[in-house]
Amino acid sequence: MIGAALRKRMCNLYSLTKGQAAIRALFRIRRDLAGNLPAMPAVFPDTAAPIVRVAESGERQLELMRWGMPGPVQFGAAPVTNIRKCDSPHWRPWLGRENRCLVPATSFCEWTDARPKVAHWFAINDERPLFAFAGIWCEWHGVRGRKADPLDGKHRLYGLLTTEANDTVRPIHAKAMPVILTREDEFEIWLNAPILDALKLQRPAPSQLLRIVAKGEKSDGADRAVA
């Protein structure tokens, strides 16, 4: 199963438990193509989840894509969920405005580096307000999904940018953390600014921005009302 292989890497589980109206409001969505979104207390690799991108009309658009970008051929072309080396020739073609996206979330999970592995959920606070991961997306033709039920055809795929861990995440997972955006000016820069300006956002979130809100669970927020 493709998703099972991806879950061995960092930051391969997050949640989105706020409702569609809240997502549209925070990200100033003008076109919603995502259908009727349920709460998603556990978003795993190869799952279809909502992203925000700028459509050809210039409007921000909400739509579903599958988590996991096509990886470099020299490394087996396995799907990649987390992207760190933006200077790589493999990723550079997808760093233009037309391929940048925001990935709405309410929390994300990291496992302890040492065994036994324990899941820790990070959010802005216990209410799990919305934020965004900085992401990129692409169209790709091939096979995705489970081996028992492969999906062959054209897919729209996304991945998350990562950066070095901040002081809150580092004691749990020292290698990296996702790039987190919380303000409209950050959303606008990532979606529309020239690439050198946009990549300045690839930095650790302020340590005081995040806190651990749950431990030891494979989902987060399942018992919370959708706002």
Image (cartoon, rainbow, N blue to C red):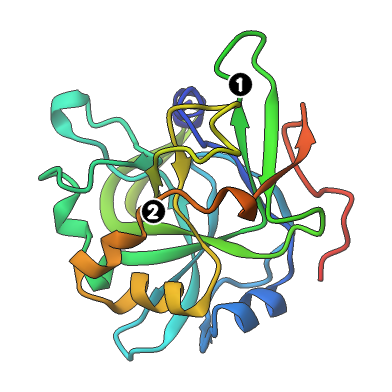
Against 181, residue 88 (above or below) is: above
Q: Position of residue 87 (x, y in %)?
A: 15, 47
Q: What residue is at 53 percent from the left and 84 percent from the top?
A: 29
* Label placed on residue 112: 1
Q: What residue is at 30 percent from the left and 78 percent from the top?
A: 192
Pick the quarter of the image with the C terminus. Answer: bottom right
Say what secondary structure mark 1 lies in: loop
Q: Quadrant of residue 202?
A: bottom left
Say what secondary structure mark 2 lies in: strand
Q: Position of residue 162 (x, y in %)?
A: 39, 44
* Label placed on residue 145: none
Nearest the viewer among 178 and 52 is 178
Q: Position of residue 164 (x, y in %)?
A: 40, 39
Residue type (three-letter) at the residue carrying disc 2? Tyr
Residue neighbourhood size for the residue with mark 2, other residues' Cα within 10 Å, grouped as few (<14), some (14–19), many (≥20): many
In the current view of this chain or complex, which residue is farthest to the left? 89
C-alpha gap between disc 1 and disc 2: 25 Å
Q: What residue is at 36 percent from the left and 61 percent from the top?
A: 201
Q: Position of residue 99 (x, y in %)?
A: 28, 65
Q: What residue is at 33 percent from the left and 58 percent from the top?
A: 137
* Label placed on residue 158: 2
Task: Give the side of residue 65 with respect to residue 54, left or right.
Answer: right
Residue type (three-letter) at the residue carrying disc 1? Thr
Against 225, residue 191 (above or below) is: below
Task: Give the side of residue 106 with respect to residue 137, left or right.
Answer: right
Residue neighbourhood size for the residue with mark 1, other residues' Cα within 10 Å, grouped as few (<14), some (14–19), many (≥20): some
Mark nearer the N terminus (1 vs 2) = 1
Mark in front: 1 vs 2 = 1
